[in-house]
Image: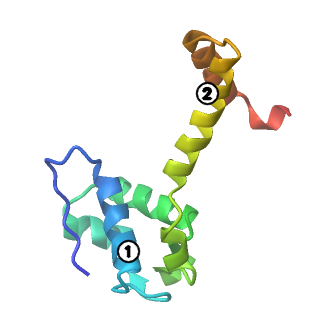
């Protein structure tokens, strides 16, 4: 699998990496169980900061595209192809858009929305 990062692209490098890994899974270039390079190795190969690769891997793992098996390495998740079809960002934007439209219809101002959103996102989840 060939990965190339465009440092002049407005798309963040970790997102470029995620998109290319998902594209390789969707195209069948990467198959369930295939090993991926270590974070350090891929960062060196692409001349990226290892934190950039780690962020991409963490998000891919969250989305069940890859799975980390501790010291044994990182592999393509058994359900990776199906997981690539689900766009969490698009789903989140759609859900938020629906709620915002409903609140605006009720007369809530943009300023009130921003304040409520900031309060909700900063709320301690353990205080419930």
Rendered-image quadrant of the N terminus: bottom left
Report the residue at 16% width, 51% height from top: 7
Q: Is residue 25 above or below residue 32?
A: above
Report the residue at 48% width, 64% height from top: 60
Closer to us: 125 or 71: 125
Question: Is residue 101 among the parts visible in the rendering?
Answer: yes
Q: In which quarter of the image is residue 6?
A: bottom left
Report the residue at 40% width, 78% height from top: 26
Kindly indicate whether the residue at mark 2 contacts the one at mark 1 (C-beta within 8 angstroms): no
Q: Is residue 122 above or below residue 67?
A: above
- Residue beneath disc 1: 38
Report the residue at 34% width, 55% height from top: 14
Closer to us: 35 or 4: 4
Mark 1: secondary structure: loop
Mark 2: secondary structure: helix
* Residue 123 picture location, percent across and down: 71, 28
What separation in Å lies between label 1 and label 2 (alpha carbons)?
Answer: 41 Å
- 95 lies left or right of 17: right
Numbered tag placed on residue 100 in the rendering: 2
Q: Is residue 78 above or below residue 120?
A: below
């Amino acid at each position: 699998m060939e990965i190339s990062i465009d440092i002049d692209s407005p798309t963040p490098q970790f997102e470029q990496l995620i998109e290319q890994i998902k594209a390789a899974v969707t195209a069948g270039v990467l198959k369930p169980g295939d090993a991926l390079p270590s974070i350090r190795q891929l960062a060196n190969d692409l001349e990226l900061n290892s934190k950039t690769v780690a962020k991409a891997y963490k998000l891919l793992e969250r989305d069940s595209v890859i799975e980390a098996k501790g010291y044994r390495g990182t592999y393509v998740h058994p359900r990776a192809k199906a997981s690539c079809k689900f766009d969490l960002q698009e789903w989140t934007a759609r859900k938020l858009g629906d709620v915002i439209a409903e609140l605006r219809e009720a007369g809530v101002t943009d300023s009130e929305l921003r304040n409520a959103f900031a309060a909700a996102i900063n709320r301690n989840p353990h205080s419930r």
